[in-house]
Image: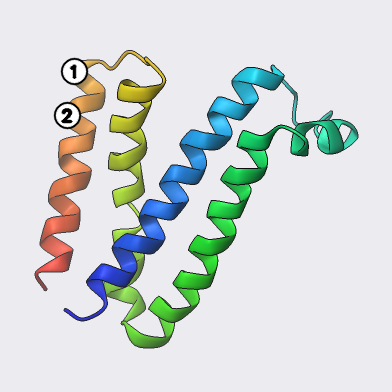
Amino acid sequence: MKGIPLIISAVMLGAVGQIIMKKGMQIYGSVSAGAVWGQLIPILKIPHVSLGLLCYGLSAVLWIAVVSNVDLSLAYPMVSLAYVIVFLASWLFLGEQISMVRIAGLVLIAAGVVVISRS
């Protein structure tokens, strides 16, 4: 599975970008979907938001290498690992509460990734 480390790197960068961006938006405050364009410049001035977007960009560059070397039917389901990473990081670093129902869903996602990665 030569592409697995590359896939994991791309997915990790995307997940880290989510957590960092969330921290930045906690600093900035709430914004609606309709108002985001009008507030984009001040939002991008929040270092966490810019760093989160940079992580996304790097993730996309790595993903280009992934899709050029690995079957998409294997690689794309691995993106769901980001759910697991973000779930755990949200609990650890953002103090979000998690329910047993969410944990059960997370276990199902992780099990699916394991099954697909072994095929």
The quadrant of the image that shows the N terminus is: bottom left
Q: Nearer the viewer, residue 35 or 62?
A: 62
The residue to which callout 1 is attached is 100
In this rendering, is residue 81 above or below 108? Answer: below
Element assignment for label 1: helix
Q: Which residue, as the protein is rendered here, is positioned at the far right?
A: 38
In this rendering, is residue 90 above or below 53? Answer: above
Residue at image location 51% in from the left, 45% down from the top: 17
Residue at image location 71% in from the left, 21% down from the top: 28
Left or right for 68, reference 41: left
Residue at image location 42% in from the left, 46% down from the top: 15
- Residue 94 shows in the view: yes
The residue to which callout 2 is attached is 104
Q: Which residue, as the protein is rendered here, is positioned at the far bottom?
A: 69
Q: Amino acid at mark 1?
A: Met
Q: 10 Å neighbourhood of mark 2: few (<14), some, or many (≥20)?
A: few
> Is the Cβ of the residue at disc 1 closer than 8 Å to that at disc 2?
yes
Element assignment for label 2: helix
The image quadrant of residue 39 is top right
Left or right for 19, reference 48: left
The image position of residue 106, as x and y in percent, is 22, 36
The quadrant of the image that shows the C terminus is: bottom left
The image quadrant of residue 38 is top right
Badge number at residue 91 = none
Q: Amino acid at mark 2?
A: Ala
Left or right for 47, reference 11: right
The image position of residue 88, as x and y in percent, is 28, 31
Q: Nearer the viewer, residue 79 or 45?
A: 45
- Residue 77 shows in the view: no
Q: 10 Å neighbourhood of mark 1: few (<14), some, or many (≥20)?
A: few
